[in-house]
Image (cartoon, rainbow, N blue to C red):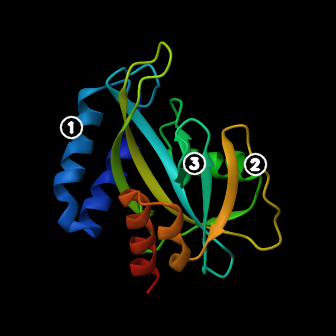
Amino acid sequence: MHRRTLLQLLERYGDVWPGEREQVQRFVAFVDGHADCLLRTCTPGHITSSAWILAPDSDAALLTHHKKLARWLQLGGHVDGDPDVAASALREAREESGMARFEVLRWAGAELVPLDLDVHPIPARGAEPEHLHWDVRFLLRAAPGQELAISDESHDLGWFAPSQLQAVTDEESVLRLMRKAAQVLG
């Protein structure tokens, strides 16, 4: 399974966010140590991708109230073997929002750099044991004039201004996405 593109993204992330080199090293060790890291069948965990989606005027972010986890989160999911994790984040954004048009923001120059990296546990469910999601997160902006459509994976979708976000979530990784997006967009 080809992981070079992912490793290059991780390297660029470490260059742009030097204070997070330890997190980058954890990701690189996981990717190097698991040839099947892009597949759900990688039982210790697997790579996922998600999107911090900004409204067209960048004044709000789109969150989904996730059915399985019963929390407000950014949109995203499994990469299902796709080595292009940015394309997977875009696919998940489309599937989970009902919108089709997004701009993938290249905020760190010409090369694409993830906005954030996060490792979080997913509780056991049915026959699936507890495992880790190694989430690579990208910054997207929705094109104007699109309607939202709630997917089967969500209870609800909503646009939240930064001042509203803490009223719906205390998830540090979600709040970190908000802070980082504000930082990179100035």
For the C terminus, which image quadrant?
bottom left
Write down the residue under mark 3.
87
Q: Give the x, y percent position of residue 138.
A: 49, 59
Residue situated furthest top in the rendering: 127
* Residue 120 in the figure: left or right of residue 162: left
Write down the residue under mark 2.
150
What distance separates the C-alpha of mark 2 from that of mark 3?
21 Å
Q: Give the x, y percent position of residue 124.
A: 42, 23
Label 2 packing within 10 angstroms: few (<14), some (14-19), many (20+)? some
Amino acid of disc 1:
Ala
Residue situated furthest bottom in the rendering: 186
Badge nearest the viewer, 2 or 3: 2
Amino acid of disc 2:
Ile
- Relative to 34, say whether 117 is above or below: below
Write down the residue under mark 1.
29
Q: Can you see residue 108?
A: no
Residue at x 33% of width, y 25% of height: 35
Q: Can you see residue 136?
A: yes
Label 2 element class: loop
Label 3 packing within 10 angstroms: few (<14), some (14-19), many (20+)? some
For the residues labelled 1 and 3, say whether their Cβ atoms are less than 8 Å apart.
no
Amino acid of disc 3:
Ala
- Relative to 81, say whether 55 is above or below: below
Q: Of 169 and 136, which appears nearest the observer?
A: 169
* Residue 96 in the figure: left or right of residue 163: right
Q: Of 177 and 39, which appears nearest the observer?
A: 177
What distance separates the C-alpha of mark 2 from that of mark 1?
36 Å
